[in-house]
Structures are given as structure tokens and as C-alpha cells.
């Protein structure tokens, strides 16, 4: 199972990416990047950090 990074041009000489799950569900949308090199660096950062990221639950224990 792997996601798909889609590169999108915003029409303003900037770019963003969308991360989609295998079933087509959009999982994340990036902010705008000024060029492709910055966008690729953003994709690499997501790949590296998502694999090692912690899950932090900010729900109140009494609000169940």
C-alpha cells in the first residue's frame, strides 16, 4: 500500500502537491511552493517525517 503524490500548478507560477491514498482519498494538500525544486524537497520531507512521526492525541480524556 502506497500513496500517490500529485503535482499541481496553481497558475501563479507556483506549485503544490496532493497526497492521495490508494483508493483516491486525498490525505494531505501542501502549501504553495515557489518552484519545482522546493516542491520536491517538501515531498521528501513528508516521506521522511511521516514514517517516523509520533501520534499525539490532544483530546480531553473527560470528553468521551
Image: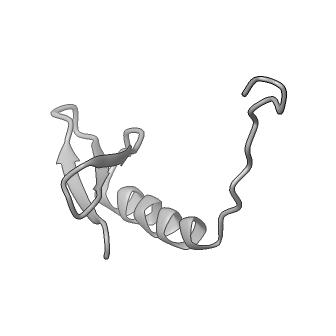
Front position in the image: 22 or 44 = 22
- Farthest residue to the top: give it: 63
- Farthest residue to the bottom: give it: 1
Is residue 11 toward the left or the right of residue 60 in the image? left
State which quadrant residue 22 falls in: bottom left
Residue at the spot 42% in from the left edge and 39% down from the top edge: 31
Residue at the spot 31% in from the left edge and 66% down from the top edge: 3
Q: How many marks?
A: 0
Residue 64, given in percent of the width and then of the height, sits at 72, 28
State which quadrant residue 40 falls in: bottom left
Is residue 6 toward the left or the right of residue 55 in the image? left
Residue 14, given in percent of the width and then of the height, sits at 28, 41
Q: From the viewer's perspective, is residue 26 above or below residue 19?
A: above
Q: From the viewer's perspective, is residue 15 above or below residue 4?
A: above
Q: From the viewer's perspective, is residue 4 above or below residue 34?
A: below
Residue 44, given in percent of the width and then of the height, sits at 46, 70
Front position in the image: 45 or 38 = 45
- Farthest residue to the front: give it: 64
Is residue 60 toward the left or the right of residue 12 in the image? right
Coloring applied to the structure: one colour
Quadrant containing the N terminus is bottom left
Residue at the spot 66% in from the left edge and 64% down from the top edge: 53
Residue 43, given in percent of the width and then of the height, sits at 41, 63
Amino acid at each position: 500500500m502506497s500513496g500517490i503524490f500529485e503535482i499541481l500548478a496553481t497558475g501563479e507560477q507556483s506549485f503544490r502537491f496532493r497526497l492521495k491514498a490508494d483508493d483516491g482519498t486525498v490525505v494531505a494538500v501542501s502549501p504553495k511552493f515557489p518552484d519545482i525544486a522546493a516542491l520536491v524537497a517538501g515531498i521528501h520531507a513528508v516521506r521522511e517525517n511521516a514514517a517516523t512521526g509520533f501520534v499525539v492525541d490532544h483530546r480531553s480524556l473527560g470528553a468521551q
